[in-house]
């Protein structure tokens, strides 16, 4: 009996020691995620305030006269392009495809490739170039850049870990950083989680769900500590919707799904043409041409072509000015096209939402619906257009729900996302971000560097 009691005691001590070691290991593994989350939240707030300030500066400059745009826009567009071209080529554009490529290439054999996509230099150039684009009136957003910035922060924290620290997968850090970045940018924690599942990982989410949940919460709370518990948009009135509004939602989703996919395909087509330009001055001429077109449209047509598009969302949702002119959706589509293709830094999330809101507003004017129903069509347009671009309907739905805190219309928005996702396939089978990710991978392949030890690259090339 004494031997049995002694064995039980030794087993209990062993189990307690193992449990304590596991708890210590789990805690040490969680600390880097939490530290990076706090930094991400603070960085997102600072970037948000700088971006808003840049847009306000543009509005101040052109408040009395629009002609300065013919000088300001070309100068800013060229400078933003030059910064990226000279110092960090992979800081161009949104940032989401770069993060997707970094996730795919994250392995010990390809660390040098991930460093080109996520780094401190990327953060500096991304912020500076996108702010310059915003000052120039570029139709770009800050949300995609925030995702690349956040992923870079998480990667930098990972690199600072001592060798004795419990092992953490770099891929997990990057995915978690991207989710935390989106959550902090839009103040949409569920949106960040769904984005990680639907767009970034698609598989193996269970391996790091705890890290994502905790990081999204901490990054969001860090941002809220400075900005307050704000909504990205606000509380649009949606009480008393018409029973027939589902037909309007379906129509808006059809139009926005097609137009969002068409805009994305047009951008990709322009990129393919730009790839044929042989000399640097050709690129400068292209950037100046895009800037002058933006200035021309703002001067002779409407200044709505400028900026991220948030002003259109707020005006149509929260004022009595529910209906836009027929040409506003066209401007909100061509604006991002001429801004995004310059090669400067800037996201497409907010411009896509703004374009969708303008389409929803226009459709509402066709049928002279009530203000409540008009709000519903505007939100459906935002979901539909973003889905047409990204092919991530659940992310689009959750983002719009969290931006407005109007969960009573979740079925309406899911319908919009589903229809937009289905019809977008008629324009292009694969998402905008998938095509751009393939482009970045091919760009790295030209440097004769090995990538993707899991063998996924060949499959993606077939998709492209």
Image (cartoon, rainbow, N blue to C red):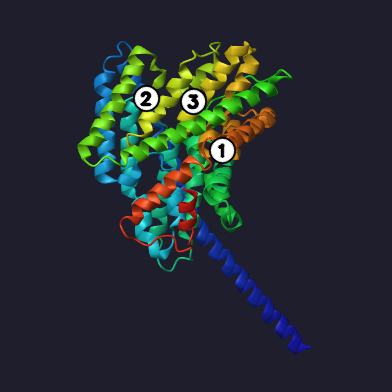
Q: Horizontally, is 51 left or right of 28 in the view?
A: left
The x, y position of residue 445, in whole percent, is 35, 56
Residue 16 lies in quadrant: bottom right
Q: CA distance from mark 3 to mark 2?
A: 15 Å
Q: Report which residue position mark 3 lands on.
A: 354
Q: Report which residue position mark 2 lands on.
A: 55
Q: Horizontally, is 374 left or right of 227 in the view?
A: right
Q: Horizontally, is 234 left or right of 239 in the view?
A: left
- Labels 3 and 1: the sequence-earlier one: 3
Q: Please name the residue shown 38% across and 13% down the image.
A: 301
Q: In this orientation, which residue lies closer to the viewer: 153 or 299?
A: 299
Question: Looking at the image, can residue 232 be seen?
Answer: no
Q: Please name the residue shown 75% across and 84% down the image.
A: 5
Q: Kindly indicate whether the residue at mark 2 contacts the one at mark 3 (C-beta within 8 angstroms).
A: no
Number of residues whose C-alpha sits closer than 10 Å to that of mark 3, classed few (under 14), some (14–19) or many (20 or more): many
Q: Report which residue position mark 1 lands on.
A: 425
Q: In this orientation, which residue lies closer to the viewer: 330 or 383?
A: 330
């Amino acid at each position: 009996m004494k031997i049995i009691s002694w064995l039980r005691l030794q087993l209990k001590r062993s189990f307690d020691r193992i449990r304590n070691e596991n708890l210590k290991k789990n805690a040490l593994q969680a600390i880097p995620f939490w530290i990076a989350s706090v930094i991400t939240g603070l960085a997102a707030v600072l970037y948000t305030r700088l971006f808003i300030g840049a847009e306000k500066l543009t509005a101040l400059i052109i408040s009395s006269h629009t002609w300065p745009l013919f000088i300001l826009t070309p100068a800013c567009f060229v400078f933003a392009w030059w910064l990226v071209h000279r110092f960090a080529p992979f800081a161009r554009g949104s940032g989401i495809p770069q993060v997707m490529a970094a996730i795919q290439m994250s392995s010990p054999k390809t660390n040098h490739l991930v460093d080109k996509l996520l780094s401190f230099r990327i953060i500096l150039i991304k912020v500076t170039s996108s702010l310059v684009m915003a000052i120039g009136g570029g139709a770009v957003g800050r949300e995609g850049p925030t995702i690349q910035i956040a992923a870079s922060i998480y990667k930098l924290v990972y690199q600072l870990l001592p060798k004795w620290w419990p092992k953490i997968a770099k891929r997990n850090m990057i995915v978690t950083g991207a989710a935390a970045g989106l959550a902090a940018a839009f103040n949409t924690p569920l949106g960040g989680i769904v984005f990680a599942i639907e767009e970034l990982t698609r598989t193996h989410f269970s391996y790091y769900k705890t890290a994502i949940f905790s990081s999204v919460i901490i990054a969001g709370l860090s941002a809220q500590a400075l900005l307050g518990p704000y909504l990205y948009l606000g509380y649009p009135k949606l009480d008393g919707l018409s029973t027939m509004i589902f037909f309007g939602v379906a129509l808006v989703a059809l139009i926005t799904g097609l137009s969002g996919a068409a805009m994305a395909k047009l951008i990709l087509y322009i990129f393919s043409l730009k790839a044929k330009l042989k000399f640097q001055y050709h690129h400068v001429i292209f950037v100046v041409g895009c800037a002058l077109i933006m200035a021309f449209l703002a001067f002779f047509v409407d200044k709505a072509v400028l900026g991220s598009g948030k002003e259109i969302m707020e005006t149509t949702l929260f004022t009595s000015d529910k209906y836009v002119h027929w040409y506003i959706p066209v401007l909100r589509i061509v604006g991002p096209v001429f801004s995004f293709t310059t090669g400067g830094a800037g996201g497409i999330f907010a411009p896509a939402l703004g374009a969708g809101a303008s389409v929803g507003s226009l459709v509402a004017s066709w049928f002279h619906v009530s203000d409540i129903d008009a709000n519903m069509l505007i939100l459906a347009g935002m979901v539909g257009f973003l889905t047409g671009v990204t092919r991530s309907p659940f992310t689009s739905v959750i983002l719009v729900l969290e931006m407005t805190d109007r969960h009573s219309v979740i079925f309406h928005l899911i319908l919009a996302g589903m229809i937009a996702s289905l019809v977008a396939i008629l324009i292009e089978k694969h998402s905008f971000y998938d095509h751009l990710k393939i482009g970045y991978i091919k760009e790295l392949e030209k440097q004769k560097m090995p990538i993707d030890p899991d063998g996924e690259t060949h499959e993606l090339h077939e998709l492209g």
